[in-house]
């Protein structure tokens, strides 16, 4: 018995995209273009939503009085090299949720970095420049949830290595398809784009592995 849970290989996704349209030129060149469209679609999905399969929860860094930390190396999860972004509202130290701020604002509030004590704010300048403010004492544990950057889809990518769950891989295909149709001047590409956006909205609405029904909702007394 086989379940619909193994997903597709990178080659299968590219070949399906190739077969969906009438591309010109050699098949090898067209397949190369298909991989580019598939990976562009993955990035689109990454920016749209914190997908459960990309979410790393309760990871942490240990402060050492550094001015900043590279989250591509300082995190403790084995996949930290694939760090994509911090999940909003997840950064905490002890019993305190840290407040996001910009480097510009902190430069105004504490230009000499004279404030000390337990961190109250954080600033994410880039994936290699994460700051807790004040810098804190040596050994503070700062917890956070973060989102993985999708793994690049290539010809030798195994089904198990595709970043998105099998139930979301159709979105990769559809996202690649409208881009391909647009770039090859196929007149119906906007129709395909609208279909993709509708599928995306539905997938986000149903992305939780648990669907809570009304029976679990406690009425509020007026």
Image (cartoon, rainbow, N blue to C red):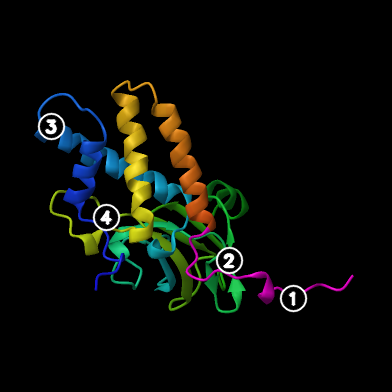
Report the front residue among 20 and 136: 20
Q: Which mark is residue 144?
A: none
> Is residue 101 within the magenta segment?
no
Cα separation, mark 4 vs mark 1, equals 41 Å
Residue pointed to by mark 3: 29
* Eye-nearest disc, 2 or 1: 1
Q: Earlier in the sequence, mark 2 or mark 1?
A: 2
Q: Which mark is residue 218?
A: 1
Place residue 181 in its image quadrant.
Answer: top left
Q: Residues within 10 Å of mark 4 (few under 14, many from 20)?
A: some
* Eye-nearest disc, 4 or 2: 4
Magenta span covers which residues? Answer: 206-222
Report the front residue among 1 and 146: 1
The residue positioned 36% from the left and 69% from the top of the image is: 75
Cα separation, mark 2 vs mark 1, equals 30 Å
Residue pointed to by mark 2: 98
Report the front residue among 145 and 123: 145
**SS class of the residue under badge 3?**
helix
Pinpoint residue 88: horizontal percent, then vertical percent.
54, 59
Q: Earlier in the sequence, mark 4 or mark 1?
A: 4
**SS class of the residue under badge 1?**
loop
């Amino acid at each position: 018995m086989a379940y619909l849970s193994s997903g597709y290989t990178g080659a299968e996704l590219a070949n399906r995209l190739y077969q969906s349209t009438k591309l010109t030129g050699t098949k090898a060149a067209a397949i190369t273009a298909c991989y580019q469209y598939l990976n562009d679609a993955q990035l689109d999905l990454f920016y749209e939503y914190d997908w459960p399969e990309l979410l790393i929860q309760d990871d942490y860094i240990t402060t050492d009085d550094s001015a900043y930390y590279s989250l591509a190396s300082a995190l403790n999860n084995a996949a930290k090299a694939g760090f994509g972004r911090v999940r909003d509202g997840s950064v905490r130290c002890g019993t305190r949720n840290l407040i996001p701020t910009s480097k510009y604002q902190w430069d105004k509030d504490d230009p000499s970095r004279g404030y000390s004590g337990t961190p109250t704010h954080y600033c994410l300048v880039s994936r290699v420049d994460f700051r807790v403010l004040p810098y804190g004492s040596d050994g503070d544990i700062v917890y956070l949830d973060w989102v993985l950057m999708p793994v690049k889809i290539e010809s030798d990518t195994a089904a198990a290595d595709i970043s998105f769950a099998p139930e979301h891989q159709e979105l990769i295909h559809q996202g690649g398809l409208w881009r391909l149709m647009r770039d090859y001047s196929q007149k119906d590409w906007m129709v395909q784009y609208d279909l993709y956006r509708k599928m995306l909205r539905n997938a986000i609405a149903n992305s939780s592995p648990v669907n809570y029904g009304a029976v679990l909702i406690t009425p509020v007394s007026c």
